[in-house]
Image (cartoon, helix red, strand yellow):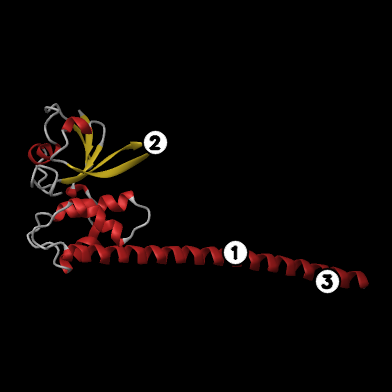
Amino acid sequence: MRFILNRDIINTDVHPATSLLDFIRRNQNLKGTKEGCREGDCGACTVLVGELNGNEIRYKNINSCLVPIGDINGKHIITIEGLNRSGLKNFKNELVNEGGTQCGFCTPGFIVSFSGYLLEKIKYNVEDAIEYLGGNICRCTGHGTIKRAVVNTINFINYNLLKIAMHKRWLEVMKKKRRLLLSLIIIFLILVKFAVLAILLEN
């Protein structure tokens, strides 16, 4: 079997029925993916799986405890260790600020699931994001603090997306104004040229 795990190409001959969770934790020693219920109910073992769909790679969340490694041949698996940490800094900070980590056991699963939401969706809203995290369970916080972290992060993302859109719009307007100004200058120069030519002809 051959697949990509985070940034590494993996070639392995382990039994194809071995769970992806066991391979990640025991064979690759990546302990960020947690072993919880082993029944796909708690979300602690969540990872991202990517596979080609036409000319692009589509990612989705999976419970690694339920997936045999034979099913991920030729795919891309991303664990919490493989995520772009700087890109998720805001969400992680919000989890800490809102008290959404506490024991921390479930935190990697929530971060991976939230990453899957951001990768899958084009437009973000709070209700969809919270629903998307429905497969992740936190036994410490009662989810209220985690929901607040999600709300703050989605609002932050949407605010910055709006700023980017407004900036692009401003650039487009300025580009049109520059074109108009350039056209007016050219017309003015042409008129000046004709005026000078008319004066020369009169003389």
Residue pointed to by mark 2: 54
The front one of 47 and 168 is 47
Q: Relative to residue 183, is residue 79 depicted above or below? A: above
Q: Is residue 157 left or right of residue 18?
A: right
Residue 141 position, x and y percent, is 11, 63
Kind of residue sitting beneath label 3: Ala
Q: Which callout, 2 or 1, points to the residue nearer the camera? A: 2
| Residue in the image at 25% along x and 55% along y | 131
Residue 120 position, x and y percent, is 32, 49
Q: Secondary structure at mark 1?
A: helix
Q: Residue lying furthest right in this view?
A: 202
Q: Is residue 20 left or right of residue 132?
A: left
* Sooner in the amino-acid sequence: mark 2 or mark 3: 2
Kind of residue sitting beneath label 2: Gly
Residue pointed to by mark 3: 195
User: CA separation, marks 1 and 3?
Assistant: 28 Å
The front one of 90 and 58 is 58
Kind of residue sitting beneath label 1: Lys
Residue pointed to by mark 1: 176
| Residue in the image at 17% along x and 65% along y | 144
User: CA separation, marks 2 and 3?
Assistant: 62 Å
Rate crowding at label 1 as few (under 14), some (14 to 19) or many (20 or more) other CA atoms within 10 Å. Answer: few
